[in-house]
């Protein structure tokens, strides 16, 4: 009996290992990708201002332009994913990221960086839609949410490793070292692209290879699915927990409280650790849309609690302030973890399986519309209105949560009327990494 105990009741660390070969391969990809991104992002401010020679204002302008471009490219990029297959576009955009990183050490002006940044934006738009489409298409229904939880954990592990490597680079205090750091990110992106090319073909990739997916599927698309657009809009609002996490609480700590600034490092470290170890646990309870809505309410409760806890620290002092600010950051991390599980369920249940790229593109647009206003508004409310501002922020989240219920029902009704029954693909992780036969462009990405 004792020999069976680990299998039936696995220990804490054993649960952190993805349970299937496919989930392990996808988690590995997430970690490779985020390690490369994190290594560059850690020193990107130094790279852009001291290596490229741009002013802070020009850096902000370039990032704003590329952000708008990524927003505008999201929907057409999603259409592209459906047309040519998620795996092919995912690998191609990752090769594109590698090429952009290779170009960065040779960038010497605002215009040159803007050109590379726009290519990054295109790769980001198509890459996000193709990655999400592939994961949902390639996995059986019962494995989708759990696997995405493991990928989320792996992503945070990679960003942490990348930040450490980037910090080591900055510690040399040598601009030549900083200039060539993007080549390390390029190398990891190249490995990531190769890794993606070795993944098995998803069902939609096979339909593209056989010519079945050349024509747009019949029936209404996501732009006519008001429920989906509302769900993703309000989901974007719920994800403004990241604005609280990364912008508002740190500014509040520095400007309003007497907490030492070094506490910021502890706050972000706590968030990273929790987002590495807990997603596999917090996602366990999501099996259907009803569970997802329950998770939305739990997430919102954590968000509101964070607002109320942080709000009172303007009048506390010393250790009490430190503990309350830390607790406010932990509760907003809880909001992040629970809305993650809900978001994965919405993607799995409310997207047309024939149009996942297009649906993801529409989701990226509406989610951005639901959140792009938050940094300016939340900062103004908290810093200018004080306690009343925090209550308004909490109220915004409550309204978004209440609106989620009818939005989900609207999207669910649309799905019941217009989506085909989805055919399960069993044992996909054990299939050969190549498709069954050559299709249009089938050799471009199989670069083994």
Image (cartoon, rainbow, N blue to C red):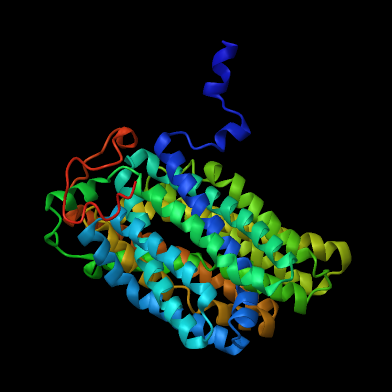
Image quarter of the N terminus: top right
Q: Is residue 236 left or right of residue 446?
A: right
- Image position, residue 400 (x, y; %): 46, 68
Q: Residue sitting at 70 percent across and 71 percent down?
A: 250
Q: Residue sitting at 59 percent across and 78 percent down?
A: 378
- Image position, residue 358 (x, y; %): 26, 64
Quarter-of-image position of residue 162: bottom right
Q: Residue sitting at 35 percent across and 68 percent down?
A: 230
Note whether residue 406 is visible: no
Q: Residue furthest top?
A: 1
Q: Is residue 409 left or right of residue 394?
A: left
Return the residue nearer the eye: 251 or 100: 100
Return the residue nearer the eye: 326 or 275: 275
342 in relation to 390, above or below? above
Q: Is residue 87 left or right of residue 249?
A: left
- Image position, residue 202 (x, y; %): 27, 46
Quarter-of-image position of residue 319: bottom right
96 in relation to 277, above or below? below
Q: Residue furthest right?
A: 318
- Image position, residue 172 (x, y; %): 74, 66
Q: Residue sitting at 29 percent across and 48 percent down?
A: 137
- Number of numbered tags placed on the structure image: 0
Note whether residue 10 is visible: yes
Return the residue nearer the eye: 290 or 136: 136
């Amino acid at each position: 009996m004792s020999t069976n105990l680990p299998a039936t009741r696995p220990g804490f660390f054993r649960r952190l290992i993805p349970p299937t070969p496919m989930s392990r391969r996808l988690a590995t990809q997430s970690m490779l990708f985020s390690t490369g991104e994190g290594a560059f992002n850690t020193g990107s401010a130094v790279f852009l201002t001291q290596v490229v020679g741009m002013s802070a204002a020009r850096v902000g302008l370039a990032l704003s332009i590329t952000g708008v471009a990524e927003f505008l490219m999201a929907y057409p990029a999603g259409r592209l994913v459906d047309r040519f297959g998620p795996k092919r576009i995912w690998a191609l955009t990752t090769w594109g990221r590698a090429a952009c990183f290779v170009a960065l050490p040779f960038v010497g002006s605002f215009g040159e960086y803007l050109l590379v940044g726009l290519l990054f934006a295109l790769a980001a738009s198509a890459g996000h839609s193709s990655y999400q489409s592939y994961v949902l298409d390639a996995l059986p229904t019962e494995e989708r949410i759990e696997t995405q939880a493991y990928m989320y954990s792996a992503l945070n592990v990679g960003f942490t490793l990348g930040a450490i490597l980037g910090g080591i680079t900055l510690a040399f205090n040598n601009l030549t070292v900083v200039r060539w750091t993007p080549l390390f990110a390029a190398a990891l992106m190249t490995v990531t692209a190769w890794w993606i090319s070795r993944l098995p073909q998803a069902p939609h990739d096979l339909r593209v290879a056989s010519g079945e997916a050349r024509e747009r599927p019949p029936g209404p698309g996501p732009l006519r699915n008001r429920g989906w657009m509302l769900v993703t809009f309000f989901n974007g609002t719920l994800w403004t927990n990241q604005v609280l996490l990364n912008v508002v609480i740190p500014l509040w700590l520095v400007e309003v409280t007497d907490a030492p600034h070094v506490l910021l490092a502890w706050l972000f470290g706590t968030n990273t650790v929790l987002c590495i170890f807990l997603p596999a646990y917090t996602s366990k309870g999501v099996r259907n849309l009803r569970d997802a809505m329950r998770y939305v309410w739990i997430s919102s409760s954590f968000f509101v609690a964070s607002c109320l806890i942080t709000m009172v620290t303007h009048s506390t002092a010393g250790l009490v302030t430190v503990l309350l600010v830390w607790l406010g950051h932990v509760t907003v991390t809880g909001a992040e973890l629970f809305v993650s599980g809900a978001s994965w369920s919405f993607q799995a249940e409310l997207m047309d399986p024939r149009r996942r790229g297009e649906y993801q593109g529409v989701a990226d647009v509406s989610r951005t519309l639901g959140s792009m206003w938050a940094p300016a508004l939340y900062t103004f409310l908290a810093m200018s209105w004080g306690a009343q501002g925090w209550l308004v922020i909490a109220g915004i989240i409550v309204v978004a949560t209440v609106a989620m219920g009818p939005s989900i029902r609207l999207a669910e009704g649309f799905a019941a009327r217009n989506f085909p029954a989805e055919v399960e693909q069993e044992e996909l992780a054990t299939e050969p990494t190549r498709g069954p036969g050559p299709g249009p462009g089938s050799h471009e990405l199989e670069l083994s």
